Image (cartoon, rainbow, N blue to C red):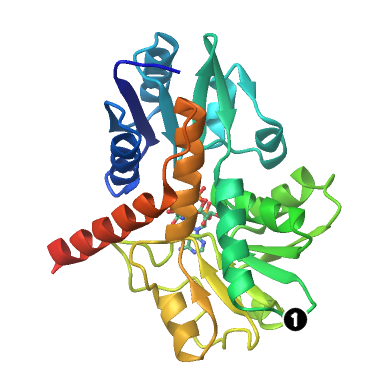
Protein backbone atom coordinates (compact mmCIF):
# COMPACT_ATOMS: atom_id res chain seq x y z
CA UNK A 1 0.00 0.00 0.00
CA UNK A 2 1.50 3.36 -0.97
CA UNK A 3 0.41 6.74 0.21
CA UNK A 4 2.12 10.10 -0.19
CA UNK A 5 1.14 11.34 3.26
CA UNK A 6 -0.71 9.45 5.95
CA UNK A 7 -3.15 11.25 8.22
CA UNK A 8 -4.36 9.45 11.32
CA UNK A 9 -6.05 10.75 14.42
CA UNK A 10 -7.88 10.23 17.67
CA UNK A 11 -11.53 11.19 18.14
CA UNK A 12 -12.88 11.62 21.67
CA UNK A 13 -13.46 14.01 24.50
CA UNK A 14 -11.10 14.72 26.12
CA UNK A 15 -8.13 13.71 23.94
CA UNK A 16 -5.40 16.08 25.09
CA UNK A 17 -3.94 13.55 27.57
CA UNK A 18 -3.30 10.93 24.87
CA UNK A 19 0.10 9.38 24.22
CA UNK A 20 -1.03 7.98 20.85
CA UNK A 21 0.53 10.87 18.84
CA UNK A 22 4.01 9.92 20.18
CA UNK A 23 3.48 6.25 19.42
CA UNK A 24 2.19 6.77 15.88
CA UNK A 25 4.84 9.41 15.05
CA UNK A 26 7.43 6.81 16.08
CA UNK A 27 5.70 4.11 14.01
CA UNK A 28 5.58 6.39 10.94
CA UNK A 29 9.26 7.27 11.26
CA UNK A 30 10.32 3.66 11.89
CA UNK A 31 8.50 2.56 8.73
CA UNK A 32 9.94 5.52 6.74
CA UNK A 33 6.43 6.87 6.09
CA UNK A 34 5.48 10.52 5.86
CA UNK A 35 2.46 11.47 7.92
CA UNK A 36 0.93 12.76 11.10
CA UNK A 37 -1.38 11.72 13.93
CA UNK A 38 -3.74 14.48 15.05
CA UNK A 39 -6.03 14.92 18.02
CA UNK A 40 -9.66 15.56 17.03
CA UNK A 41 -11.65 16.70 20.08
CA UNK A 42 -15.27 15.63 19.57
CA UNK A 43 -17.50 16.87 22.38
CA UNK A 44 -20.68 16.12 20.40
CA UNK A 45 -21.97 13.72 17.71
CA UNK A 46 -21.74 16.45 15.07
CA UNK A 47 -17.93 16.65 15.50
CA UNK A 48 -17.71 12.85 15.42
CA UNK A 49 -19.60 12.77 12.11
CA UNK A 50 -17.43 15.57 10.67
CA UNK A 51 -14.25 13.52 11.20
CA UNK A 52 -15.85 10.35 9.85
CA UNK A 53 -16.89 12.29 6.71
CA UNK A 54 -13.28 13.43 6.31
CA UNK A 55 -12.27 9.79 6.39
CA UNK A 56 -14.93 8.83 3.83
CA UNK A 57 -13.54 11.57 1.56
CA UNK A 58 -10.03 10.13 1.91
CA UNK A 59 -8.58 13.06 3.85
CA UNK A 60 -8.03 10.90 6.95
CA UNK A 61 -6.65 7.36 6.58
CA UNK A 62 -7.20 5.93 10.03
CA UNK A 63 -8.90 6.82 13.29
CA UNK A 64 -8.73 5.74 16.89
CA UNK A 65 -11.83 6.22 19.00
CA UNK A 66 -11.90 6.93 22.71
CA UNK A 67 -14.29 8.04 25.47
CA UNK A 68 -17.21 8.76 24.98
CA UNK A 69 -17.68 7.40 21.42
CA UNK A 70 -16.46 3.79 21.54
CA UNK A 71 -20.00 2.41 21.57
CA UNK A 72 -22.13 5.05 19.83
CA UNK A 73 -19.80 5.14 16.80
CA UNK A 74 -21.32 1.78 15.83
CA UNK A 75 -24.28 3.76 14.40
CA UNK A 76 -22.06 5.49 11.81
CA UNK A 77 -19.93 2.64 10.41
CA UNK A 78 -20.54 0.50 7.30
CA UNK A 79 -19.10 -2.71 8.74
CA UNK A 80 -17.64 -4.02 11.97
CA UNK A 81 -15.41 -7.01 12.77
CA UNK A 82 -16.65 -10.11 14.57
CA UNK A 83 -14.76 -8.94 17.68
CA UNK A 84 -16.65 -5.63 17.64
CA UNK A 85 -19.96 -7.47 17.20
CA UNK A 86 -19.18 -9.48 20.34
CA UNK A 87 -17.53 -6.77 22.46
CA UNK A 88 -19.85 -3.95 21.41
CA UNK A 89 -17.08 -1.31 21.33
CA UNK A 90 -14.80 0.15 18.61
CA UNK A 91 -11.38 1.74 19.14
CA UNK A 92 -10.12 1.73 15.53
CA UNK A 93 -11.68 2.70 12.21
CA UNK A 94 -10.06 1.81 8.91
CA UNK A 95 -11.24 2.11 5.36
CA UNK A 96 -11.50 -0.48 2.56
CA UNK A 97 -12.94 0.46 -0.85
CA UNK A 98 -14.76 3.46 0.57
CA UNK A 99 -16.31 1.50 3.45
CA UNK A 100 -15.60 2.51 7.04
CA UNK A 101 -14.88 -0.57 9.15
CA UNK A 102 -14.79 -0.72 12.94
CA UNK A 103 -12.29 -2.89 14.83
CA UNK A 104 -11.35 -3.31 18.46
CA UNK A 105 -7.58 -3.59 18.89
CA UNK A 106 -7.92 -3.18 22.68
CA UNK A 107 -8.86 -6.88 22.79
CA UNK A 108 -5.63 -8.26 21.23
CA UNK A 109 -3.66 -5.42 22.90
CA UNK A 110 -4.90 -6.40 26.37
CA UNK A 111 -4.60 -10.12 25.62
CA UNK A 112 -0.97 -9.83 24.53
CA UNK A 113 0.02 -7.76 27.55
CA UNK A 114 -1.84 -9.83 30.13
CA UNK A 115 -0.25 -13.00 28.73
CA UNK A 116 3.18 -11.39 29.18
CA UNK A 117 2.22 -10.49 32.77
CA UNK A 118 0.85 -13.95 33.55
CA UNK A 119 3.83 -15.73 32.05
CA UNK A 120 6.22 -13.78 34.28
CA UNK A 121 4.26 -14.76 37.42
CA UNK A 122 3.01 -18.34 37.12
CA UNK A 123 -0.42 -18.32 38.80
CA UNK A 124 -2.37 -21.04 40.56
CA UNK A 125 -4.62 -23.35 38.56
CA UNK A 126 -7.65 -21.21 39.37
CA UNK A 127 -8.40 -18.60 36.75
CA UNK A 128 -10.70 -16.17 38.53
CA UNK A 129 -10.53 -12.53 37.43
CA UNK A 130 -12.21 -9.46 38.88
CA UNK A 131 -12.58 -6.48 36.52
CA UNK A 132 -13.37 -3.06 38.02
CA UNK A 133 -15.47 -0.84 35.72
CA UNK A 134 -17.91 -1.71 32.95
CA UNK A 135 -17.08 0.70 30.11
CA UNK A 136 -15.47 0.03 26.73
CA UNK A 137 -12.08 -1.02 28.11
CA UNK A 138 -13.68 -3.32 30.71
CA UNK A 139 -15.63 -5.00 27.90
CA UNK A 140 -12.41 -5.56 25.93
CA UNK A 141 -10.53 -6.90 28.97
CA UNK A 142 -13.40 -9.16 30.10
CA UNK A 143 -13.86 -10.51 26.58
CA UNK A 144 -10.13 -11.25 26.20
CA UNK A 145 -10.02 -12.97 29.62
CA UNK A 146 -13.07 -15.12 28.77
CA UNK A 147 -11.35 -16.13 25.52
CA UNK A 148 -8.29 -17.13 27.58
CA UNK A 149 -10.46 -19.37 29.76
CA UNK A 150 -10.82 -17.11 32.82
CA UNK A 151 -13.96 -16.86 34.88
CA UNK A 152 -14.70 -13.14 35.06
CA UNK A 153 -16.60 -11.01 37.55
CA UNK A 154 -17.33 -7.42 36.57
CA UNK A 155 -17.78 -4.88 39.36
CA UNK A 156 -19.41 -1.56 38.46
CA UNK A 157 -20.71 1.32 40.55
CA UNK A 158 -23.88 1.09 38.41
CA UNK A 159 -24.52 -2.64 38.54
CA UNK A 160 -26.88 -2.33 35.54
CA UNK A 161 -23.84 -1.50 33.38
CA UNK A 162 -22.10 -4.73 34.45
CA UNK A 163 -25.33 -6.70 33.98
CA UNK A 164 -25.59 -5.34 30.43
CA UNK A 165 -22.16 -6.86 29.65
CA UNK A 166 -23.30 -10.12 31.24
CA UNK A 167 -26.27 -10.20 28.84
CA UNK A 168 -24.23 -9.12 25.81
CA UNK A 169 -21.61 -11.83 26.49
CA UNK A 170 -24.07 -14.62 27.21
CA UNK A 171 -22.94 -16.58 24.15
CA UNK A 172 -19.40 -16.95 25.56
CA UNK A 173 -18.44 -20.32 27.04
CA UNK A 174 -17.40 -18.80 30.38
CA UNK A 175 -20.35 -17.25 32.21
CA UNK A 176 -19.77 -13.75 33.53
CA UNK A 177 -20.77 -12.50 36.98
CA UNK A 178 -21.92 -8.91 37.60
CA UNK A 179 -21.59 -7.27 41.02
CA UNK A 180 -21.71 -3.82 42.52
CA UNK A 181 -18.38 -2.02 43.01
CA UNK A 182 -18.77 -1.68 46.78
CA UNK A 183 -16.80 -2.83 49.81
CA UNK A 184 -19.42 -5.41 50.82
CA UNK A 185 -19.58 -7.03 47.36
CA UNK A 186 -15.83 -7.02 46.80
CA UNK A 187 -15.02 -8.39 50.29
CA UNK A 188 -16.31 -11.86 49.37
CA UNK A 189 -14.44 -12.08 46.04
CA UNK A 190 -11.31 -14.25 45.82
CA UNK A 191 -9.77 -13.36 42.45
CA UNK A 192 -6.21 -14.24 41.52
CA UNK A 193 -6.23 -11.49 38.90
CA UNK A 194 -7.56 -7.99 39.62
CA UNK A 195 -7.93 -5.61 36.64
CA UNK A 196 -8.70 -1.91 36.95
CA UNK A 197 -10.65 -0.70 33.90
CA UNK A 198 -11.96 2.48 35.52
CA UNK A 199 -10.19 5.83 35.01
CA UNK A 200 -9.75 6.19 38.78
CA UNK A 201 -6.07 6.91 39.46
CA UNK A 202 -5.43 8.40 36.01
CA UNK A 203 -3.76 11.79 35.48
CA UNK A 204 -4.61 14.52 36.27
CA UNK A 205 -6.52 13.05 39.27
CA UNK A 206 -3.94 10.49 40.31
CA UNK A 207 -4.40 10.26 44.07
CA UNK A 208 -7.45 7.96 44.14
CA UNK A 209 -7.89 4.21 43.99
CA UNK A 210 -10.95 2.39 42.60
CA UNK A 211 -10.56 -0.16 45.44
CA UNK A 212 -12.69 0.79 48.48
CA UNK A 213 -10.72 2.40 51.29
CA UNK A 214 -10.15 0.13 54.29
CA UNK A 215 -10.85 -3.09 52.36
CA UNK A 216 -7.71 -5.26 52.06
CA UNK A 217 -6.74 -6.21 48.51
CA UNK A 218 -7.28 -9.89 47.64
CA UNK A 219 -4.30 -11.74 49.13
CA UNK A 220 -3.27 -13.82 46.14
CA UNK A 221 -4.09 -11.49 43.27
CA UNK A 222 -1.89 -10.23 40.49
CA UNK A 223 -2.94 -6.62 39.86
CA UNK A 224 -3.17 -5.09 36.38
CA UNK A 225 -4.15 -1.44 35.88
CA UNK A 226 -5.14 -0.32 32.37
CA UNK A 227 -3.99 3.17 33.31
CA UNK A 228 -0.46 3.97 32.11
CA UNK A 229 -0.20 7.62 33.24
CA UNK A 230 0.93 7.74 36.01
CA UNK A 231 2.89 4.47 35.64
CA UNK A 232 2.31 3.72 39.35
CA UNK A 233 -1.30 4.38 40.32
CA UNK A 234 -2.44 4.32 43.97
CA UNK A 235 -3.96 0.86 43.31
CA UNK A 236 -0.67 -0.50 41.93
CA UNK A 237 1.28 1.18 44.71
CA UNK A 238 -0.85 -0.49 47.43
CA UNK A 239 -0.50 -3.85 45.69
CA UNK A 240 3.25 -3.39 45.32
CA UNK A 241 3.67 -2.62 49.03
CA UNK A 242 1.81 -5.87 49.80
CA UNK A 243 4.21 -7.79 47.54
CA UNK A 244 1.60 -8.54 44.87
CA UNK A 245 2.74 -8.67 41.22
CA UNK A 246 1.70 -5.52 39.33
CA UNK A 247 1.62 -4.19 35.76
CA UNK A 248 0.30 -0.98 34.23
CA UNK A 249 -1.40 -0.49 30.84
CA UNK A 250 1.60 0.88 28.88
CA UNK A 251 2.21 -2.48 27.17
CA UNK A 252 -1.45 -2.70 26.19
CA UNK A 253 -1.37 0.81 24.72
CA UNK A 254 1.66 -0.08 22.60
CA UNK A 255 0.13 -3.36 21.38
CA UNK A 256 -3.24 -1.84 20.47
CA UNK A 257 -1.48 1.06 18.67
CA UNK A 258 0.71 -1.35 16.68
CA UNK A 259 -2.39 -3.34 15.67
CA UNK A 260 -4.25 -0.16 14.57
CA UNK A 261 -1.23 1.08 12.58
CA UNK A 262 -1.01 -2.29 10.82
CA UNK A 263 -4.70 -2.09 9.80
CA UNK A 264 -4.20 1.42 8.40
CA UNK A 265 -0.91 0.93 6.56
CA UNK A 266 -0.42 -2.82 6.10
CA UNK A 267 2.89 -2.58 8.02
CA UNK A 268 3.58 -3.77 11.57
CA UNK A 269 5.78 -1.15 13.28
CA UNK A 270 8.73 -2.31 15.43
CA UNK A 271 7.26 -2.65 18.93
CA UNK A 272 10.56 -2.12 20.74
CA UNK A 273 10.71 1.40 19.27
CA UNK A 274 7.13 2.10 20.40
CA UNK A 275 7.92 0.87 23.92
CA UNK A 276 10.88 3.19 24.14
CA UNK A 277 8.86 6.15 22.71
CA UNK A 278 6.20 5.48 25.33
CA UNK A 279 8.74 5.44 28.12
CA UNK A 280 10.31 8.73 26.90
CA UNK A 281 6.86 10.38 26.61
CA UNK A 282 5.96 9.35 30.16
CA UNK A 283 9.26 10.69 31.52
CA UNK A 284 8.71 13.97 29.68
CA UNK A 285 5.16 14.21 31.11
CA UNK A 286 6.48 13.64 34.65
CA UNK A 287 9.27 16.22 34.12
CA UNK A 288 6.81 18.89 32.91
CA UNK A 289 4.46 18.18 35.80
CA UNK A 290 7.17 18.98 38.40
P1 LIG B 1 -15.40 4.38 29.95
O1 LIG B 1 -15.99 3.70 28.77
O2 LIG B 1 -15.77 5.77 30.28
O3 LIG B 1 -15.68 3.45 31.21
C1 LIG B 1 -15.19 3.79 32.49
C2 LIG B 1 -15.79 2.85 33.52
O4 LIG B 1 -15.28 3.23 34.80
C3 LIG B 1 -17.33 2.97 33.62
O5 LIG B 1 -17.87 1.75 34.06
C4 LIG B 1 -17.47 4.05 34.71
O6 LIG B 1 -18.72 4.02 35.37
C5 LIG B 1 -16.38 3.62 35.65
N1 LIG B 1 -15.98 4.69 36.54
C6 LIG B 1 -15.65 5.97 36.21
N2 LIG B 1 -15.37 6.68 37.31
C7 LIG B 1 -15.53 5.84 38.35
C8 LIG B 1 -15.40 6.00 39.76
N3 LIG B 1 -15.04 7.18 40.30
N4 LIG B 1 -15.65 4.94 40.55
C9 LIG B 1 -16.03 3.75 40.01
N5 LIG B 1 -16.19 3.54 38.69
C10 LIG B 1 -15.93 4.58 37.87
O7 LIG B 1 -13.79 4.37 29.81
P2 LIG B 1 -12.86 3.24 29.11
O8 LIG B 1 -12.65 3.58 27.69
O9 LIG B 1 -13.44 1.92 29.45
O10 LIG B 1 -11.46 3.49 29.85
C11 LIG B 1 -11.29 3.14 31.19
C12 LIG B 1 -9.80 3.31 31.58
O11 LIG B 1 -9.00 2.41 30.81
C13 LIG B 1 -9.26 4.72 31.29
O12 LIG B 1 -8.37 5.07 32.33
C14 LIG B 1 -8.50 4.55 30.01
O13 LIG B 1 -7.43 5.47 29.85
C15 LIG B 1 -7.95 3.13 30.19
N6 LIG B 1 -7.63 2.48 28.90
C16 LIG B 1 -6.35 2.08 28.70
C17 LIG B 1 -6.02 1.45 27.53
C18 LIG B 1 -4.60 1.00 27.31
O14 LIG B 1 -4.27 0.72 26.16
N7 LIG B 1 -3.79 0.92 28.34
C19 LIG B 1 -7.00 1.23 26.54
C20 LIG B 1 -8.31 1.66 26.78
C21 LIG B 1 -8.60 2.29 27.98
P3 LIG B 1 -19.81 5.17 35.02
O15 LIG B 1 -20.27 4.87 33.62
O16 LIG B 1 -20.82 4.99 36.08
O17 LIG B 1 -19.07 6.49 35.09
Q: Secondary structure at mark 1?
A: loop
Dot 1 alpha-carbon crowd within 10 angstroms: few under 14, some 14 to 19, many 20 or more: few
Q: 12 or 224: nearer the eye?
A: 224
The picture quadrant where one finds residue 224 is: bottom right
Q: Position of residue 6 (x, y in %)?
A: 33, 23
- What residue is drawn where x is 42% and y is 26%? 62
Q: 56 or 76: nearer the eye?
A: 56
Relative placement, left or right, of 276 versus 241 is left
Q: Which residue is mark 1?
A: 124
Vertically, is 267 above or below 188?
above
Residue 45 in sight in this render: no
Vertically, is 239 above or below 97?
below
The picture quadrant where one finds residue 10 is: top left
Q: Is mark 1 within 8 Å of ligand 1?
A: no
Q: 127 or 13: nearer the eye?
A: 127
Vertically, is 134 above or below 13?
below
Q: Position of residue 222 (x, y in %)?
A: 60, 77
- What residue is drawn where x is 54% and y is 20%? 76
Residue 174 in sight in this render: yes
Relative placement, left or right, of 240 versus 111 is left
Q: Position of residue 159 (x, y in %)?
A: 66, 59
Relative placement, left or right, of 66 versus 279 is right
- What residue is drawn where x is 54% and y is 80%? 245
Amino acid sequence: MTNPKWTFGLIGHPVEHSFSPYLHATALEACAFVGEYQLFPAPDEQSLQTQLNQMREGRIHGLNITIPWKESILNYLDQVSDTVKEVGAVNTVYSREGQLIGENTDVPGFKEDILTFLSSHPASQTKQALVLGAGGAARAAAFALCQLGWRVTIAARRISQAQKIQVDFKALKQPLQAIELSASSLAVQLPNLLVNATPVGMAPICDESPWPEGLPLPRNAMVYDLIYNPPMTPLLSTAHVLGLPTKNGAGMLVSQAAASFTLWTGRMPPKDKLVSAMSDALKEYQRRKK
